Amino acid sequence: MKTSIKLWDEDERPREKLISKGCSSLSNAELLAIVLRSGTPEKTALDMAREVLKLSSGKLKRLSEFSVEQYKSISGIGDAKAVSLMAIFELTRRMNSETEDNQPIIRESSTVMQIMGPILQNLPHEECWAIYLNRGNRLLSKERISIGGVDHTSIDIRIIVKKAVEKLASSVILVHNHPSGNRFPGEADRNQTAALKNALNVFDIALLDHIIVAGNKYFSFSDENY
């Protein structure tokens, strides 16, 4: 028989502890328990949060990749709780993808990785993004072009070129991820890169690089002189 969190000492309740001592005082399980909000007749929200962490071996990055069905494999977690967990991790990804008002100047592939790594490196599927730069290589915007499967996503050349023209961009950097962890480009990657470069050249827009993010590693077409 569980003991309700409401019967715990105030300093031990996650919500009250956060209010009195701040977010940093809470464990990962306690923070997840706040997101889950309530438990079941058999276990508290904290018990459930610990089960969630156990399922991911305590790794939040791995947890952020879970699907609704994976969350629901834990007794007591239904659609509402699973969606709440997914929303928290998606907000974190979007926060990491935000850029300051004073946009960075991009002259190296490592700068692109700093910007795009937090967005792409832990995704279970492929995504294609385009980074648009002005004449001084300052970031104008970055936009997701497509979402694909585990080992493929399409590069819509027409959309990338159209947006580059609309934004009056001087150059573009293409970025996509390989969930497999293999950072090297395949034949399709090389062919699509060449096709995009040629299409952009028609409008006097340069393709500066194509970067493939594979976990914490990456491949830069420019750095490797592809």
Image (cartoon, rainbow, N blue to C red):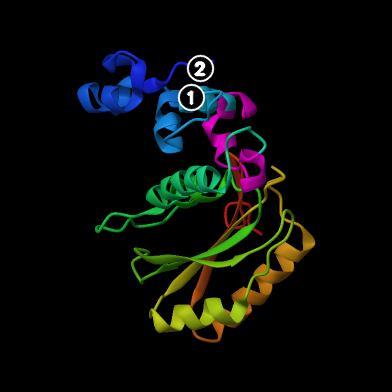
Residue marked by disc 2: 2
Dot 1 amino acid type: Thr
Res 207 quadrant in image? bottom right
The CA distance from mark 1 to mark 2 is 7 Å
**CB under 8 Å between callouts 1 and 2?**
yes
Numbered disc in front, either 1 or 2 = 2
In the displayed structure, does residue 11 sit left or right of residue 187? left
Residue 42, percent across and down?
56, 23
Residue in view at x 58 percent, y 43 percent? 78
Residue 224 vertical placement versus 26 (above, below)? below
Residue under the point 36% across and 72% down: 135
| Residue 13: x %, y % from top left | 33, 21
Q: What residue is shown with label 1?
A: 44
Between residues 84 and 100, which one lies in front from this camera angle? 84
**23 shown above or below 223:** above
Q: Residues within 10 Å of mark 2 (few under 14, many from 20)?
A: few
- Magenta stretch contains residue 173: no
Whether the magenta-drawn stretch holds residue 53 is answered as yes
| Quadrant occupied by the N terminus | top right
Q: Which residues are magenta?
A: 52-72
Query: Which residue is farthest top?
Result: 9
Mark 2 residue type: Lys
Image coordinates of residue 129 in percent, x first then y, are 54, 63
Dividing the picture into quadrants, the one containing residue 100 is: bottom left
Point 41% across, 25% down: residue: 30
Q: Report helix, strand or loop for mark 1.
A: loop
